Amino acid sequence: MGPAYLYAKVSFSVEKKKIADHDVDEELDRFERAVQRSERDLKKIIALTRDKVGSESAVIFEAQMLMLRDDALYDVVVDTIREQQVAAEYAVSVVMSKHRQMMEASDSEYLRERANDLLDVQERLIRHLRRGHILSDIPANTVVIAENLTAADIILFSRKGILACATDYGGATSHVSIMARSLGVPAVVGMHDITDHVETGQMVIVDGAKGQLTVAPTHAEKEAYKVKRKRYEQLLVEDRALIPLASETLDGHVVQLEANIELREELPLLAEYGADGIGLFRTEMILLMESRLLVSEEEQYELYRDVVATAAPGHTTFRMLDLGGDKMLPMGHREQNPFLGWRGIRILLDKPDILVPQLRAILRAAEHGPTRLLLPMVTGRDEIRAFRERLRTVRQELEAEGVRCRSDIPLGIMIEVPAAALQAESLAREVDFFSIGTNDLTQYVLAVDRGNDLVAGLFDELHPAVLRLIRYTAQAARKAGIPVGLCGELATNLQAVPVLVGLGVTSLSASPVYLPAMKRIIRSMSMGEGQEVAERALRSEDVRDTHAFLQAWLTEHGCGLDY
Ligand code: PEP
Ligand code: MG
């Protein structure tokens, strides 16, 4: 609950902003930094394009790179800032727009085409200029309202002390939502046009549990929410009493509760919420935050070593970099269908310069505690075998260098592509464990983009089609005698917990704050009850019925968190 702060809409109209005499040098520095950041982006894009598409296509970006420092642009922007004493955004916008208009009016087709590239360059520069600027403007204790946010935005905003956020775009399992959940930032996403209805300074209430936003609440609404907040806080306190207790059903079936982690600052939460280990360490964020493609082996090693040591004696499951999808780095590599494109294991196998340092860092860190390796976006056996081959080579190299590294690290795969789930029986013979990723599995099974607000209503992980694949995967794992965890956001949906236990999932991994509430449910049920609700959910012809009977079930078991 608090005043709204409307975070810059993605529009490139730039107002004329005058700066003081003594700020000119700083403004010139900002411009130079934005140019350097744009050069860094473009370098990555050029390398990627050469690699994946061919040198001819990279020419476009090479031309963009040259534009950044072209005298007719760079020098004129500098002069404009200096002489007119205006903000860099404005100078870039005026100078480049003028130049573009000239190109567009030209008789030469070549020049007309280049005009589009100049627009790209202009937008990239303004994006970099705005980013630094706007971020430093975000006031603490406000509710950020934005068209769209990235996972990196959420981290930066949460460090600034925002109260909550709400966006036009996004889905509940998009990466930005996952990040908000991990950092305990209340969020509502996919509100279509909320930025049109809220103004900076207006009082708003974000109800992350219900997915509702109240604008300009009445006195009665505010009071009602204060009561709700109290009740919610009370429930969190009650749940904490469960932390030292075992996570097992009434008839003694143990379901491990593990943590999903992606930032160093989340590590203290492991002990705080009683996690049995790390079921999913997403490694993308370290790269995103560093905003460069490759973090050195040494830097990765230092982080991974600390993670492993903190989680010990519990294990740490490192997922190899899952680039692509909605976790592409902030670089302009564009794909029509990123979720069906160059993603996860596909990138890893294509790019040894990404895979090798990460693998070396993990193998070295494994000396400090129990470690597992997890592969993202696997669709079949060959990918696993190809990875094992790389693993063998990397291990041999380390040994040849005299570096100690373990040879018994379990290798698992994400089951998040329908093809993998449907081949679970044969894949179970190739690996040491499965981890079901329902965020992607659901989007691929139901053909619903997990980050698209227009179809967010169709995204339902309790859909019987998804549950069937979970059951099949769990059965295959049991037959092969390997553990099967689940690390998608479904694990945090309390309605799903009895179903997943009943389907035979052996561990659940989620943001640590959710673990106590999940444990409450596990401790209140028997395996037989789980199997019963699972059977009913699998047979359901309307997923709305499933939600209704599961909610009733939770209430009967004293776990219907009604806040
Ligand atoms: C998943 O897909 O369910 C998952 C856990 O991975 P991510 O959300 O990182 O894609
Ligand atoms: Mg996934």
Image: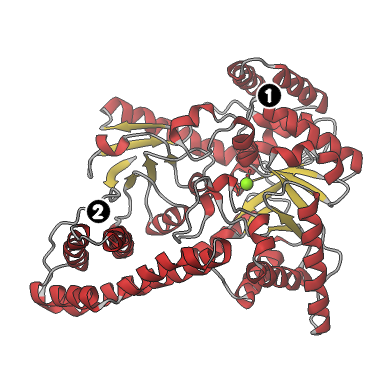
410 vs 109, nearest the viewer: 109
Q: Is residue 88 above or below residue 482?
A: below
Name the residue beneath numbered marker 1.
464
Q: Which mark is residue 12?
A: 2
From the viewer's perspective, is 453 left or right of 539? left
**Among the 4 quarters of the image, the one containing residue 286:** bottom right
Indicate the colouring scheme.
secondary structure
- Give me the residue at 28% from left, 51% from top: 8
Secondary element at image label 2: loop
537 vs 265, nearest the viewer: 537
- Amino acid at circle 2: Phe
- Give me the residue at 13% from left, 73% from top: 80
From the viewer's perspective, is 21 left or right of 5? left
- Amino acid at circle 1: Pro
From the viewer's perspective, is 94 left or right of 516? left
Residue 508 at least partly seen: no
Between disc 1 and disc 2, whose residue precedes?
Answer: 2
198 vs 88, nearest the viewer: 88
Of badges 1 and 2, nearer the viewer stands: 2
